[in-house]
Image (cartoon, rainbow, N blue to C red):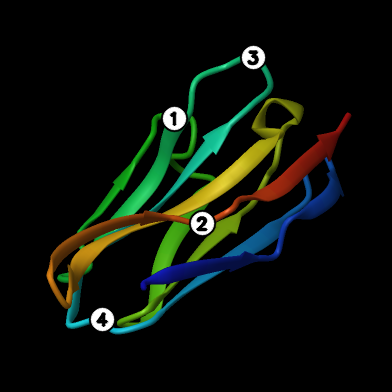
Amino acid sequence: QVQLVESGGGLVQAGGSLRLSCRASGIIFSINAMGWYRQAPGKQRELVATITGGDSTNYADSAKGRFTISRDNADTVNLQMNSLKPEDTANYYCNAIGRTTGGLFNRWGQGTQVTVSS
């Protein structure tokens, strides 16, 4: 069973920074892409940023210029968030798509709360 464990959320003032990390564990043959999504109360889950195995990145417009997604190695993804705004407050979820025994997987972490105070 592939599992994702997130860390790094917390409370920060507007203009501050946070770094989220997510590590995948289990029997993993390959990871095609990892990413971060967020969900604020009363809103749908939305893309923040993704990164492929070839290190191609994709960002939501709201994240461009402020957030940076990166991979430490094949199974760990980070999200450096700078110049945080109150509207960035949400539960942030890690996602990974890859291949394990039995075929493809598409897994979500349990989420880590980010709260930005004004």
Helix, strand or loop for disc 2: loop
Dividing the picture into quadrants, the one containing residue 85 is: top right
Give how far apart the Cα atoms at labels 1 and 2 are.
15 Å
Give the mark nearest the N terminus, 1 or 2: 1
Q: Residue 42 shows which numbered tag?
A: 3
Give the image location of residue 4, x and y in percent: 48, 67
Count the marks: 4
Badge 4 amino acid: Ile
For disc 2, the neighbor class at 10 Å (few under 14, some 14 to 19, many from 20) is: some
Give how far apart the Cα atoms at labels 4 and 1 are.
26 Å
Q: Is residue 32 visible?
A: no
Of 102 and 71, nearer the camera is: 102
Q: Residue 109 shows which numbered tag?
A: 2
In the image, 39: left or right of 31? right
For disc 3, the neighbor class at 10 Å (few under 14, some 14 to 19, many from 20) is: few
Badge 2 amino acid: Gly
In the picture of the structure, the residue carrying the numbered disc 4 is 28
Name the quadrant of the N terminus. bottom left
Residue sitting at x 81%, y 54%: 10
Give how far apart the Cα atoms at labels 1 and 3 are.
12 Å
Give the image location of residue 116, x and y in percent: 80, 38
In the picture of the structure, the residue carrying the numbered disc 1 is 46
Give how far apart the Cα atoms at labels 2 and 4 are.
16 Å
Residue sitting at x 49%, y 20%: 44
Give the mark nearest the N terminus, 4 or 1: 4
